[in-house]
Amino acid sequence: MARMIPPRYEGTASAAEKRVFHLLEGDPATSEWFILHSLGLSKRGSGPYGEIDFVVLVPLGGVVCLEVKGGRVSCKDGVWQTIDRFGAISELKKSPFMQAREGMFGLLHAVQERFGSGSDASRCLFTYAVVFPDVDCPPKTPEFETWEAIDHNTLKTPISQLILNVLSGQRKKLGGFYPSTNAGSAIRDVRQFLRPDFERIIARSTVVSESESSLISLTEDQYEVLDMISDNPRCLIEGAAGTGKTVLALEYSRRQSAAGQKVLLLCFNRLLGEWLESCGSSLRVSGLAASSYFRFLRKLILDSAWGKEYEMAEQTTSQDELFSGLLPLYGQLAAEGLDSQFDTVVLDEAQDLLSSSALDVLGALLKGGIAGGRWYIFGDFTRQCLYGNTSREVRLRELTSTCANFSHTKLHTNCRNTRRIGEETALLSGFSSPPYKLGQVDGLPVDYRYWKNPQQQLEKLTEVIRGLLAEGMNPHDVVLLSGRKFADSVASRLACQTQTHGTVSAVEIRSGVSPFAKGSRVGFATIQSFKGMETPAAIVCDIQHVDTDEPQALLYTGMSRARSLLILMVHESVRTGIANSLMRKLNEGWKS
């Protein structure tokens, strides 16, 4: 089965394109091929833009551009027309063969510009053909070769053979042209170059950079997971920190809601939930509800017939009982009273949410329930389960006892952190090998600053902040993280005098409050509250232990928040422990 990119055709695709799509997808001989459907071109011939119906990438070094013309076809006085099954006539500005030829040369030009005219990618065999799936081939003219036309009769032959015939004809026409010996690698390069041109998604932004927004390309295994969850109604997706779980959860929710589905996107962390909610609003797609789980639950209850009773019970309930008992109880009652359920539920940070009570509530919110509805659950069960000590096996047992029939896959590539940050995060967190494939950007080394007493840590932190700002770093791009509350952290005493920003202090990033409303400040958050978020630069403070599970879990979560720059403020007593952790890379021969 060919790799179709994208995996489904759009609703605007013609019946002829759909037929060709299924022929290419279902031919067993195309299992190693890549088929790009509706590839846009920034320039085609003399026009400012264009589109190729199908680009077929054959591993042996062939690139075939297909133009599909369905319905009846006619040509009178040199003017081509197509007539669809309803009798609607469309006049073509150029013959289908000229359209296909221009598309091919436009694509070749783009590849040459990207890789160079002498590259292996540019030395692939580029050709084209026109497919007439409903009629006989037009009469032969000097405008095209017989093998450049595929009609409804020839389509009785497997389409893979017809594509190979087109490549063979072009090779003979060019006098025995043969691609590079690295044709397979070149085809993969062409595929990687073309695919991002029409699939880009919004990346996560950090709270501290005030809705920083940028575009990133999905990694290959993220594409595969998106393809998989599009084909399966229920999926569990596991991935270590930085593998893009939240990005995919948001992107899939956006796609589903844009397709008219009513989607509920939930996470555990309050700050992350607010960010997801703001993204849902900015995307301007109807039908998408995004929030943190308990925030959504409380609003659901207050808007229900149970609201007043819950508010009274809430006043006399401890915090532990509120989250473990009261909210789930009234949440399920409120969910069962809804007039309409959600078509799809997407759950991020599942390691902190998979419990029987949560699954009961979600089942009441979802059409078909957990056992038969559409849901997609993302989680990291390695070191990020900071709330409680429930193991991965127990969490998954809760899910399988509710639903026995779902798909399960993993994300492998760290697409958030630089290679050095990703590697040292895994080392200090106690992993025997990296829990992800490391990224390709090497980046700056992790910066360790050792201190002997609280005053010296403050002095070291002040020195670090002053140096970063002097080098041009925006204070809003720096977040201080700690396993301690703000009042107990060194961050609360920061008052750094700088030439460029005056006195710089730290301010706690709290729910619903912009930490940078006034003056020059760097943000502070506990590691627990910042889980799921990210920042260009992170300074992890107050580190005093690295050798047991709990501090290692905090380090794993805190260190992995930094995209490009990571600084660790570490007590002298653990210098040896850190050195031993870093030596494991050499002693154990880490591979990633």
Image: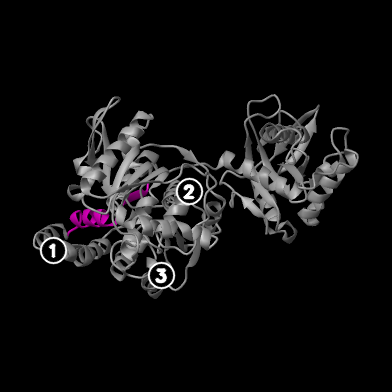
Query: Which span is picked out in magenta?
Result: 287-305
Quadrant location of the C terminus in the rendered image: bottom right
Q: Which residue is mark 1?
A: 318
Q: Which residue is mark 3?
A: 371
Instruction: Give the Cα distance between marks 1 and 2.
Output: 43 Å
* Left or right: 46, with 537 as reference point: right
Q: Is residue 301 magenta?
A: yes
Q: What kind of element bears circle 1?
A: loop
Viewer-proximal residue, 269 or 515?
Answer: 515
Quadrant location of the N terminus in the rendered image: bottom right
Q: Which residue is mark 2?
A: 420
Q: Give how far across and how far down residue 295 sits, in percent.
A: 24, 53
Q: Give how far across and how far down residue 186 sits, in percent.
A: 72, 45
State which mark lies toward you, 2 or 3: 2
Residue 322 is drawn in which quadrant?
Answer: bottom left
Q: Give how far across and how far down residue 221 sits, in percent.
A: 55, 54
- Badge 2: residue crowd in 10 Å (few <14, some 14–19, many ≥20): many
* Left or right: 74, with 287 as reference point: right
Identify the residue shown where x is 52% and y is 62%.
587
Mark sitting earlier along the chain (1/2): 1
